[in-house]
Every structure is written in structure tokens, then in C-alpha cells.
Image (spheres, grey):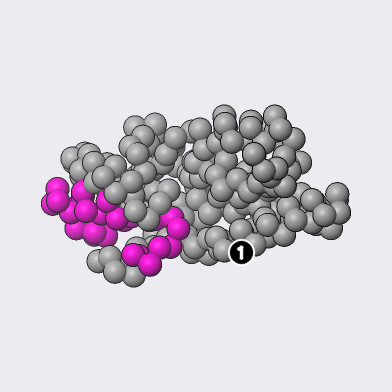
């Protein structure tokens, strides 16, 4: 097979077979995400902890306290970081963390619908939900609506990714905007510099801000 000069990992898992492969063969690599066991590796990531913290705090500032969280598998560092931000925001706001408010449904449209229906069946206990993707958030909105909820009167929903679909939901979906092209550009430049020169002119880990 033709020799590969470098690899960019577009996702980071705790146990990542792709990461294990490039390490085994000594292939230079960079990651668009956080690598759990190698903080010095080349990586460009968003501040997922801070983003989830801001989203949760936004709901708290609106007077909401019974805030649920709908995330994905703990095998992904991004999901670990977003949950950490949600947890920290509750803690700093003096709101007790309630494990029953965490829904382990798949962060997809279908998973969101299932979660929305379950939330709506909780006799108005949960008043807001932080999700880890817009597709999931739109599913939550639909599942809650099908169960008789009015969005956002009965349930406030927040997404993550700022997809164009957010413009077409009713009501509009509040979301976190990530500069994915910018992240990919920085990641590629870092890897190329490392391959060509053997060193970096910037830190090996770059954390990019996000916008609500």
C-alpha cells in the first residue's frame, strides 16, 4: 500500500481503533477533538465544557431549574466534556444534579422524539432540556409536541451545532455555533507544519471559542 504521510482524525473516542492504528504504524496525526490519554498530541477542539455551561446557564437565567440533559455515548470525549459543562453549571447555580434528568437516548432525530415523549410524560416536571445536537433537539421538540406540549411554553429546548435547520423550526432553535471549517483548517496546518519541519510554531492543543 502507498505510504500515508499523515492522518487527520475527525472524531475522538476514548478507545479509538483509528488512533491505535496510526500509533502502531508511527503515522503523524492530528485530531479535530480532544485526545483523552495524550494531551500533547496535535489537536484542535472547541470549548465543549464552556459551551454546555453557557447553554445551561442561559436556561437558569431564564428562571428554569428542572433542566434535563440528552447526550450520547461516554466513549466520545465531546460528550464527556459537554456533560461536564452541564453538571458544572447546575452546581454553580445551586441546583442539585438529578440523575433521572439525564436521558441516554441516541442523539438522533428518532432518539430525540423518544426522549421528548418521555419528558412530556413526566407530568410537567422537566421544564428545559440541553441536547448535544440540533437534530436531537428538533426530535425532542417534535416528541414533546406530539405528546401535547407547547414549545417553549411547556418545555425550552437547546441544540448544538447551529445547523441551517435551526432557522426553519417553530420556534427557532437556540444552538451553539462551531467553526468546523476553521477547526479543520487549523488542524491541517498544524499537521503539515509538523510533517515538514518536525516542530510547531503554535501550542500542540488549540481550543476554539463557540457562539450561542
- Verify whether residue 147 appears in magenta: yes
> Which residue is found at the position 29% from the left and 69% from the top?
168
- Verify whether residue 139 appears in magenta: yes
> Which residue is found at the position 56% from the left and 48% from the top?
10
> Which residue is found at the position 61% from the left and 64% from the top?
182
State the residue in front, 8 or 85.
8
Rendered image quadrant of residue 40? top right
Label 1 element class: helix
> Which residue is found at the position 44% from the left and 42% from the top?
95
- In the displayed structure, 191 sits above or below 81; it is below
Q: Which residue has dot 1 on it?
A: 182
Stretch in magenta: 138-166
State the residue in front, 94 or 110.
110
Q: Position of residue 91 (x, y in %)?
A: 51, 41
Left or right placement of residue 66 versus residue 125 in this view: right
Residue 103, visible in the rendered structure? no
Left or right placement of residue 71 versus residue 192 in this view: left
Amino acid at each position: 500500500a502507498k505510504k500515508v504521510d499523515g492522518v487527520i482524525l475527525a472524531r475522538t473516542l476514548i478507545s479509538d481503533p483509528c488512533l491505535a492504528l496510526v500509533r502502531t504504524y508511527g503515522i503523524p496525526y492530528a485530531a479535530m477533538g480532544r485526545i483523552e490519554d495524550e494531551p500533547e498530541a496535535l489537536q484542535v477542539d472547541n470549548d465543549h465544557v464552556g459551551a454546555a455551561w453557557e447553554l445551561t446557564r442561559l436556561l437558569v437565567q431564564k428562571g428554569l431549574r428542572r433542566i434535563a440533559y440528552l447526550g450520547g455515548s461516554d466513549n466520545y470525549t465531546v460528550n464527556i466534556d459537554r456533560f461536564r459543562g452541564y453538571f458544572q453549571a447546575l452546581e454553580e447555580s445551586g441546583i442539585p444534579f438529578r440523575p433521572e434528568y439525564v436521558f441516554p437516548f441516541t442523539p438522533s432525530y428518532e432518539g430525540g422524539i423518544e426522549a421528548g415523549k418521555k419528558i412530556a410524560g413526566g407530568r410537567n416536571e422537566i421544564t428545559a432540556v440541553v441536547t448535544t445536537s440540533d437534530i436531537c433537539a428538533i426530535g425532542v421538540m417534535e416528541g414533546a409536541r406530539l405528546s401535547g406540549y407547547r414549545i417553549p411554553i411547556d418545555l425550552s429546548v437547546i441544540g448544538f451545532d447551529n445547523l441551517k435547520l435551526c432557522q426553519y423550526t417553530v420556534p427557532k432553535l437556540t444552538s451553539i455555533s462551531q467553526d468546523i471549517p476553521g477547526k479543520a483548517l487549523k488542524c491541517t496546518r498544524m499537521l503539515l507544519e509538523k510533517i515538514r519541519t518536525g516542530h510547531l510554531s503554535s501550542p500542540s492543543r488549540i481550543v476554539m471559542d463557540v457562539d450561542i
